Image (cartoon, grey):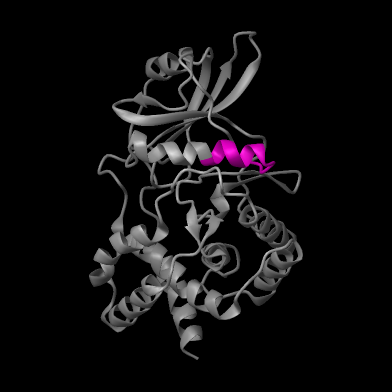
Amino acid sequence: MSVYTPLSHRQLAAVLDGYGFRLRDYRAASHGIENSTFLIEAEDRHQQPAALVLTVFETLTHAALAPYLVLLAHLAEQGLPVPAPLTDHGGQDQITVAGKPAVLMPRLPGEHDFAVDLDRCRQVGALLAQLHQCDTGALQTLPGERQRLETLASHLDQLPDDHREGARALLSDWQARPTGTTLIHGDLFRDNLLWQQGRISALLDFYNACLDYPEYDLAVTLNDWCVDSNGKPVAEREQALLESYREFGGQVDDSLLLEALAVAALRFWLSRLAGPVSDHSEGQGSKDPEEFARIFQWRITTLAE
């Protein structure tokens, strides 16, 4: 389980009371490595069951969190399957729990299911196309992925000698590009979707969302959904996802995508080398960096051909 800020039954009950819910049961989520997440069973003021999610943010401040909450409410209004934040008795969409920002949201129907097949790849492609065409005019300024990449560059020295300079040059070239203007999710791994009866029921975790190239978002997604256990790209999965993306209105620059695939693999290799946010985490903590080392090897080799 990924919990860096453990909370007691009494603490969670007090949090829920501020929203008009009564705690029945809870458990820590078993996915994610950046925040503390609790899956909650509660009752509302009419004694009706309510499935909720409380997320305690380990690194984001209240001010930094605010534009993401505006984004979630905006996307929910546009019909995307995303959870909009709940407000407490004081009308606030974020609170403080254990000295850290926290948000309570409804838990959308469905379950995590990490299986991959061509139909699921097509559904993911269609969902990304819908997201990338969303209106962004009403959004607050979101932190950029380029800022995160700049921070992660401090870990380039941890790479093996045979990759270090090539990775540094790749990252430098990418950072020199003008920033894209499309709303991207930035983290569409399999653990950020819920499924119900074989269909996507929820898209989660928008805390890497920003404006950038849609090809970068596709690259992040392809590097999780469309590779085998050795990090080798699976062509038929890639084709299914990209064909669906284009069918639902998305546009792709193939040469830019090729570069983005290598950059995205490097980004998650570096973030996993950076490790968990706390020395007191319970459970999975940092995911294996070697997974993305293998993916990067495939992507950088293809880019050089």
Vertical position of residue 103 compared to residue 114: above or below:
above
Residue shown at 48% from the left, 79% from the top: 298
Vertical position of residue 278 compared to residue 299: above or below:
above
In the rendered image, residue 202, in percent from the top left (x then y), is placed at 64, 42
Start-end of magenta stretch? 71-81
Residue shown at 57% from the left, 66% from the top: 222
Res 232 seen here:
no
Quadrant (top left/top right/bottom left/bottom right) for the N terminus: top left
Find out whether residue 80 is within the magenta segment: yes
In the rendered image, residue 62, in percent from the top left (x then y), is placed at 35, 34
| Figure label count | 0
Q: Main secondary structure of the magenta part?
A: helix
Q: Nearer the viewer, residue 87 or 27?
A: 87
* Residue 110 occupies quadrant: top right
Compared across the picture, whether 94 is left or right of 240 comes to left
Find out whether residue 90 is within the magenta segment: no
Vertical position of residue 18 compared to residue 225: above or below:
above
Compared across the picture, whether 248 is left or right of 297 comes to right
Vertical position of residue 210 compared to residue 172: above or below:
above
